[in-house]
Amino acid sequence: MASVFKTLKKKPYTEIIYMNWSIKLTSTYKEVYSKDSGPSFHVDGERYHIFDFKSSDDIELSLKWNDGNNTSIESAINHVLNSLTIPNEYMPDLNLNINIILKKKEDFSAIYLVFVPDAKRLYVIENIIHKNRKRRILIMSFGV
């Protein structure tokens, strides 16, 4: 019986990020905020998490970062956060000194990791698109 409960125990979200995106984050964090667009039959939608780390080295050394301040990435991030109606106090300040990772999949799904080294805070923004939703986007784009 104990093994059943162990299997049903909720996984840390960093494990889900690894399973979905092959991005390995260290386990030395505290989750500060979390919001998603709700349950979906196709498991698509938007997700947002904020993690505070004990040390910026914990996160900076484990991933290859790009310097921040890219207007097209900032626009995509703001689109997801606005659709989730994130309160201002949980919005990332993209004008700070930030590092960014963007990873996309062929179905147009994307994950944005925004790290603020001075605050030791990581913002994880995901836009997951199911293949049927992708088809609708393509049809609307090309007017088919």
Image (cartoon, rainbow, N blue to C red):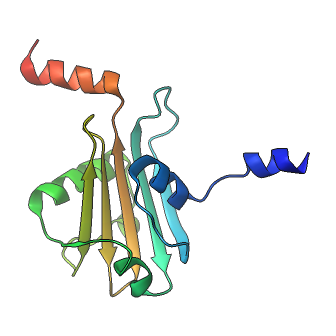
Outermost residue, top direction?
Answer: 144
Outermost residue, left direction?
Answer: 142
User: Residue at horizontal 52%, vertical 35%?
Assistant: 39
**Residue 16 spot, x, y in % from top left:** 51, 52
Q: Could you tell me which quadrant the N terminus lies in?
A: top right
Q: For residue 69, which quarter of the picture?
A: bottom left
**Residue 140 spot, x, y in % from top left:** 15, 21
Lateral position of residue 90 relative to residue 112, left or right: right
User: Residue at horizontal 21%, vertical 26%?
Assistant: 137
Residue 90 vs residue 129, the one in the foreground: 129
Above or below — where is 78 with respect to 137? below
**Residue 22 spot, x, y in % from top left:** 41, 54
Lateral position of residue 105 relative to residue 12, left or right: left
Residue 116 vs residue 66, the one in the foreground: 66
Lateral position of residue 3 relative to residue 46, left or right: right
Q: Could you tell me which quadrant the C terminus lies in?
A: top left
Above or below — where is 121 with respect to 6? below
User: Residue at horizontal 46%, vertical 54%?
Assistant: 17
How many numbered discs sit on the rendered protein? 0
Above or below — where is 1 with respect to 72? above
